[in-house]
Amino acid sequence: MEKLKVAIGCDHAGLQYKEAIMDYLKIREIEFEDLGTYTPESCDYPVIAKKVAEKVANHSANRGILICGTGVGVSIAANKVHGIRAALCGDTYTARVSRAHNNANILCLGSRVIGEHLALDIVDVWLKTGFEGGRHKRRVDMIE
Ligand code: RB5
C-alpha cells in the first residue's frame, strides 16, 4: 500500500474530532499535516477546506480529512478544487466504497452528526481501503 501522508483540517465545530483523529494517526505512525483551525474560536470552513484540498490536489499529501459540524460545508468547498473527490461519510460502508469505487481523496466528517468513536472507525476503514480500479477507474476518469 502507498505510504500515507494526510492533510487534516477542521472548523471550530470539528476541533475536538480533529484532535482525536490526530491522536489516532500518531499511534499508527501515519504522517500528517495539521492545517488548522487550532483554537475553538469561530472560523470559516471554506478557508480550511481550500487549504487541505490544495495540499491533496498538488500532491503534497495523498489523502485529506476535513471535519465541520455536518461535513457538508467542507465537502462542498473541497470539491471545488480540481482533482478533489471529497466524500462525506457517516458510516463505514460508505467510507470503504468511497475509496474502493470512487477513489475519494478527501474524507469529510460531521462532528455534530456522528459520534467520535464512529468517526474514528470511519477514518480507520477509509485510510486502509485501496482503490479497486478497473471499471471504477473509467468512471472516475469521466469525472475528471
Ligand atoms: C458551523 O456552525 C457550521 O455551520 C459548520 O461547522 C458546518 O456544519 C457547515 O457545513
Image: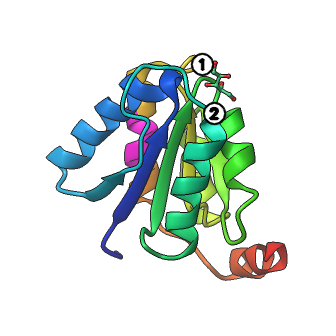
Secondary structure of the residue carrying numbered label 1? loop
The C terminus lies in which quarter of the figure?
bottom right
Residues 78 and 24: in front is: 78
Left or right, 113 with respect to 40, comes to right
Residue 71 got which mark?
2
Left or right, 118 with respect to 80, comes to left
Q: CA distance from mark 1 to mark 2?
A: 9 Å
- Residue 117 shown in magenta: no
Q: Position of residue 35 (x, y in %)?
A: 41, 48
Residues 65 and 131: in front is: 65
* Residue in view at x 48 percent, y 68 percent: 130
Say if disc 1 is inside 8 Å of ligand 1: no
What kind of residue is marked 2?
Answer: Gly
The image quadrant of residue 83 is bottom right
Q: Position of residue 14 (x, y in %)?
A: 48, 27
Majority secondary structure in the magenta region: helix
Chain part drawn in magenta: 120-125
Identify the residue under disc 1.
113
Say if disc 2 is inside 8 Å of ligand 1: yes
* 8, above or below 89, in the image: below
* Residue in view at x 61 percent, y 53 percent: 50
Contact between labelled residues 2 and 1, with CB atoms less than 8 Å apart: yes
Q: Position of residue 103 (x, y in %)?
A: 61, 67
* Residue in view at x 66 percent, y 52 percent: 78
How many C-alpha atoms fall within 10 Å of the one at disc 2: few (<14), some, or many (≥20)? many
Is tag 1's residue or tag 2's residue first in the polypeptide sequence? Answer: 2
Left or right, 142 with respect to 18, comes to right
